[in-house]
Image: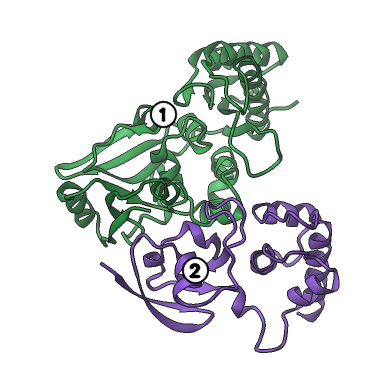
Amino acid sequence: MVALTYHAPESVEEAVQLLSTASQPVKVLSGGTDLIIQMQSLIQDERWVVDVKKIPGMRSADWRADHLRLGPSMSCAQFTKRQDIKAVFPGLVEAAYLIGSTQVQGRASIGGNLCNASPAADTIPALIANNALCLVQGINGTRRVSVADFVTGVGKHCMSSDELLIAIEVPKPAARTMDAYLRFIPRTEMDIAVAGAAVSVTLDDNGVCTAARVVIGAVAPTAILVPSAADALIGTKLDDDALLAAAAASSEAASPITDRRGTVEFRRHVVGVLTKRAAKIAATRAGAVQ
Amino acid sequence: MKSHVTTTINGDPVEFLCEPAQTLLQVLRNDLGMTGTKEGCGSGDCGACSVIFDGELVCACLVLGVEAEGAEIETVEGVAAHDQLHVIQEKFLEHAALQCGICTPGLIISTKALLEENPSPTEAEARYYLAGNLCRCTGYDKIIKAVMDAAATMRQGA
């Protein structure tokens, strides 16, 4: 493994100062479930590791006037136990619950899942479906970036090496708005998404869908928002025709690869099926009558 | 440069020196001689190195030793009360829920974490919770029987 220099700053300012003055390639340590594995494959290398878990607010989540403020390093185990969050964002909680084993969830964090930027990350589609924002701190101040724009490629995000993700802000949804996330894996547990879909829908008093966001994962270099799939749902009561049209739009938008977990054809088909099913679950949660 | 770490393991204060690149698993086994925690895969897939870290079940191979500063850690060595086995350990023996034994410490500690969080798990809940603990010998059935029996016994004793 690499030679590490370990830092555990206790404030955002101290952390950003460390990141901007690092004399060696620097990595931010959150839960470490991806980072520690990645560092094990490096030989005779030197790295600074900045552990951000001692910074106040990094491991907690609280409600603000118009959003949930989520500390990026809060463990998935802590996050999924929060019934107040599950009541509002059940799909986002489901996505966090699908990451790895109980043991991995004990350390892994949503901010880490986001910054690791795997195409198959489970929480990223659910964050985008909920219009989540990243609060990024640099040496010269903060900026907000939507999660949809944050991830720029396989394993790549928009932050420079001296910037730190200090919060994820998930806007409080409109009335009768609910989300759902589904993924396909060949086993029932402990696997990586072959395809995934997160859907958020808003219904009016008559059960007509007035707003929707459909995001598909593991079928392109990054999770992608599919406006055409959302358009297929908006204005309908999410009847079978609307769901099939949304499924077709997701399949069309996907640009998957063939690897040992699935072929292009399979992923394209399954992402449509997942879109349809997730939309139906989200609608039921939002109070649709079946 | 080695870091000085002060932590608590099984209720006892412990201090150690470690390289920042050392995992908690390496520190436990190689530096502290606590070899009850096993190394299986070393990559967070098998659960043999499970420990309870600040109340959460984690793989010790996915935690750096330096991250243990100020933490409270429970390992398999702390499960039995001196020479009196814990109910979970007794039930693993009674149901012959082990063969080679490499996965057993991890399963014991994971079962303890499960039953502290959920004293009445359904079989399905127990199987999902323990899905991160791989056993290549038993086929899991005896393990699940031991876990469910331990849960029932602990509920009666509570």
Q: Position of residue A22 (x, y in %)?
A: 18, 50
> How far from the left and from the top, in percent, is residue A12?
24, 54
Q: Is residue A128 above or below residue A30?
A: above
User: Within the image, what quadrant is residue B76 found in?
Assistant: bottom right
Contact between labelled residues 2 and 1, with CB atoms less than 8 Å apart: no
Going by the numbered disc 2, the residue's amino acid type is Asp
Q: Label 1 vs label 2: CA separation? A: 33 Å
Q: Residue at x 57, y 16 (%)?
A: A250
Q: Quadrant of residue B136?
A: bottom right
Q: Which residue is mark 1?
A: A154
Q: Nearer the viewer, residue A153 or A129?
A: A153
Please give the residue where the numbered disc 2 appears in the rendered image.
Answer: B54
Q: Which residue is drawn at the image coordinates 71% and 66% (left, top)? A: B101
- Answer left or right for A55 relative to B61: left
Q: Colour of chain A?
A: green
**Of discs 1 and 2, which sits in the foreground?**
1
Task: Return the mark for residue A190.
Answer: none
A14 lies left or right of A172? left
Secondary structure category for the residue under label 1: loop
